[in-house]
Image (tube, grey):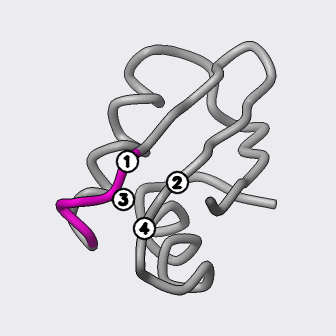
Amino acid sequence: MIQFEVPDMTCGHCVRSVTEAVKAADPAAEVAIDLPSHRVQVNSTLPREVIAAQIVEAGFTPD
């Protein structure tokens, strides 16, 4: 399980954008997002760096 804090995620549209970005790289990925805590958990076979790059490409800042 890969975990990120994404502080600039503020709404349901943000959640959808992050989920779609991760799934674009790995359609089999499991994505769980807790919006109030800005936490994104991803279960994927891809490296953390690849997932982070997808989130950045979607316009967000993963920590």
Q: Earlier in the sequence, mark 3 or mark 2?
A: 3
Q: Are marks 4 and 2 in contact (CB under 8 Å)?
A: yes
Disc 4 and disc 3: Cα gap in Å? 9 Å
Q: Secondary structure at mark 3?
A: helix
Which one is in front, 46 or 12?
A: 46
- The residue under the point 81% across, 60% down is 63
Instruction: Specify few, some or many for label 3: CA neighbours under 10 Å numbering under 14, 14-19, or 20 or more.
Output: many
The numbered disc on residue 30 is: 1
The numbered disc on residue 42 is: 2
Is the residue 6 above or below the residue 35 in the image?
below
Q: Position of residue 20 (x, y in %)?
A: 27, 47
The numbered disc on residue 11 is: none
Q: Are marks 2 and 1 in contact (CB under 8 Å)?
A: yes
Q: Identity of the amino acid at label 2?
A: Val
- The residue under the point 62% across, 59% down is 1
Instruction: Specify few, some or many for label 4: CA neighbours under 10 Å numbering under 14, 14-19, or 20 or more.
Output: some
* Residue identifier under label 3: 22
- Which of the 4 image quarters holds residue 34? top right
Disc 4 and disc 2: Cα gap in Å? 6 Å
Q: Identity of the amino acid at label 1?
A: Glu
Q: Earlier in the sequence, mark 4 or mark 1?
A: 1
Q: Identity of the amino acid at label 4?
A: Ser
Looking at the rendered image, the disc whose residue lies closer to the viewer, 3 or 1, is: 1
Which residues are drawn in magenta? 26-30
Q: Earlier in the sequence, mark 3 or mark 1?
A: 3
The numbered disc on residue 44 is: 4
